[in-house]
Each structure stands twice: as structure tokens, then as C-alpha cells.
Amino acid sequence: MKTWMYRRKRVQFKRENPHKNKHNPSDRIAFLIDGRNPVNLKVIEDYINHLQQIGKDISLLYLTDHAHPEQVSFQAFNQKSFTWYYIPKAPVVIDFIQKDFDLLINFNDENIPELNAIIDLSNAKFKIGVMEGHSDLYDLVINPGQDKSWKAYIRILENTLDQLSVGKSMV
């Protein structure tokens, strides 16, 4: 029943929030991060700082277990930010989905329905994720290999985007 309601509401949500093309393929990069596991956050934050230093427009959205994510000092949401059939109801999530990012990079290797809904509904032009679970949601799926670390994921991601780029680096 949840899946049926999600699919039904998904069509309506996408129709109300059409996709637009405006930017160079590397200007605006969004990161969707499972912030509930602080172990890997340092590697991800270092990568984001690197991209900001080279002039990229970066947006972040964290999944948190905090009871009131709107009171957190960064953009965050929790599972209660969605209806029971996974349509976003929190303004921070809706705003994130509606933005026209050039790249949406998911730093999550678990099958979390709320994250999958954000990826699926997002207006991002190019969606990147890990080869686990719902790889059909992505335009590019990264397999970090046997290492299975975020460092390996980032290294492979950058190499792949460099190979796909035309004229200049995408990241």
C-alpha cells in the first residue's frame, strides 16, 4: 500500500515541480548524507571542503535521528519529515528536492526509503550513488570495490567524472 501511494503521489509531486536546465554541469553540487554515522563524516567533510575551496557551490542535507531537525545548526531531516508513504512534508527537504543541482551525490550505502525518495524526486540533473539496493535511481553508480570506504568511493567518483567530462573536470 505504501509503495502504491508513493508512486501515485510521486507523479503529482514531479508534475508540480518540473525539472529545469540552467547551469554548467559542475556548478552546483548537492550531497545527501546519512549523518547518523559520525565515523565516516570526517572523510566526507574533507572532500566537501576541497570542492568549496575550488569554487563549487555546495549544498548539504543530512539524515539525523534528532527529534527536532529544524533546530539543528545544519540542514537536516529525520524520518518524520515524510508522510507514511514517503512524500516529503518538511520544508527543508522540499526545498532541497526542488533545487536544480547539476550533481546530486548520495553518501549512503544502506537502503533507506526516505533517502531513496529524495533521490527519486530530486530535480538534480545527474544523480550519483553507491552500488547497493536501489541503483536504478541513479544516473551513475559507483562500486567502491573491496575497500568499501568513502575514500575509495570519492577516488573512484572523481576518476569516473573526469572520464565523463567534456573539456573540463565536472568535480
Image (cartoon, helix red, strand yellow):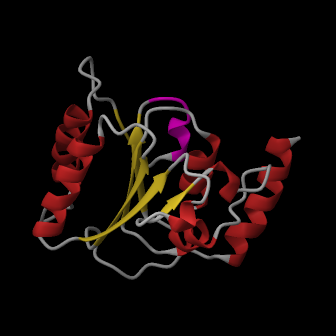
Q: Which quadrant holds the N terminus?
A: top right
**Residue found farthest to the right:** 1
Quadrant in the picture for residue 168:
bottom left
> Image quadrant of residue 107?
top left
* Residue 153 left/right relative to 139: left
Q: Nearer the viewer, residue 64 or 105?
A: 64
Identify the residue at horizontal 43%, vertical 39% (top origin). 108
Residue at x-position 41% and y-position 49%:
33
Is 83 displayed left or right of 118 in the figure? right
x and y, in percent, of residue 42 in the image: 23, 44
Where is residue 89 drawn, in percent x and y?
71, 66
**Is 14 rendered above or below residue 116?**
below
133 part of magenta stretch: yes
Give the quadrant of the C terminus. bottom left
Residue 163: image x %, image y %?
A: 17, 48
Instruction: Give the residue at x 55% y 74%.
Output: 95
What range is drawn magenta here? Answer: 132-137
x and y percentages locating residue 130 in the rendered image: 40, 36
Q: Residue at x 72, y 51 (%)?
A: 86
